[in-house]
Amino acid sequence: MRIYPLSEGSFSIDQTKVFIPFDTQREQIQDRPKGSILVEIQPFVVITEKDIILLDTGLGYMNEQGVLQIHENLMAIGINPSSVTKVFMSHLHKDHAGGMSYIDANSKARYVSFPYATYYVQKREFDLAMNNPTASYIKEQFEFLADFSKVVWLGDDQGVINDSIHYLLTGGHCPYHQVAWIKEDHDIFFFGADVAPQLQQLKSKFVAKYDMDGKLAMEWRQKWWEQGQEAGWQFAFYHDIKHPLYKANK
């Protein structure tokens, strides 16, 4: 099993929910707007013997040539975007779901970003996002799922996808947030998305104000940190600038 972070860069974000690019090499952290936080945006791609699995899809930004950022990042490591077989969505906030589809610069039409992949989405999250658009949910990014032939709706609180992806509904960050473990041979890879977005949050009793239920999210992190240390998990951190991946030692 091989794992690659697909970094889209660092961003400053405040209560407006607008992601403003932040150059950590040139800008000073203390110069960020008051009340803002600094995060990395980085989906992950996992290559197993059977699949190429994408975990969340980033912001959906395009480069100067009009190429979707996540497509560019995949091609940079030798992966044709059309070869992605599965897309697992932790939740549908815009910094995770923006790259599920994209608007073509010439035709202005919207296309599915990974048309040959199967999208795995929590149905209750989709219903919530479609019926309650907010600054965090942009339904134009994912409403295609309603008619998409290759979507698998996840309705249970936990389950297993094709014997390799184990998922769990956690809540915490938002009502129907879910996390995933990918298991192959003796390796366990854990993706905690926005309930476990940074390494330091697992190491401390941190309650985030931006979580729906910060105490619950903290309790999940403490549990996973203990379990991961015992079992030697490989952790992935979607919003960690310094530590996209961390391998725990048994």
Image (cartoon, rainbow, N blue to C red):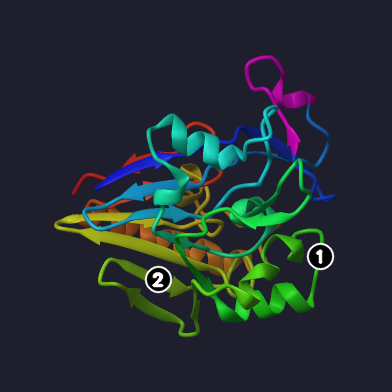
Above or below, 106 relative to 101: above
Determine which residue is flagged by label 2: 167
Give the residue type at disc 1. Answer: Thr
Q: Is residue 174 visible?
A: yes
Exactly how many numbered labels are in the figure?
A: 2
Left or right, 107 with reference to 162: right
Q: Residue at x 32, y 58 (%)?
A: 226
Give the residue type at disc 2. Answer: Tyr
Q: Residue at x 58, y 72 (%)?
A: 148
Mark 2 surroundings: few (<14), some (14-19) or many (≥20) residues within 10 A: many
- Taking the view exactly as shown, the residue that stands out farthest to the front is 107
Q: Percent position (x, y) of residue 114?
A: 52, 55
Left or right, 200 with reference to 62: left
Give the CA separation, mark 2 to mark 1.
Answer: 26 Å
Left or right, 178 with reference to 24: left
Q: Which mark is residue 214?
A: none
Q: Which residues are magenta?
A: 20-31
Instruction: Mark 2 or mark 1: name the one nearer the start of the chain.
Output: 1
Determine which residue is flagged by label 1: 134
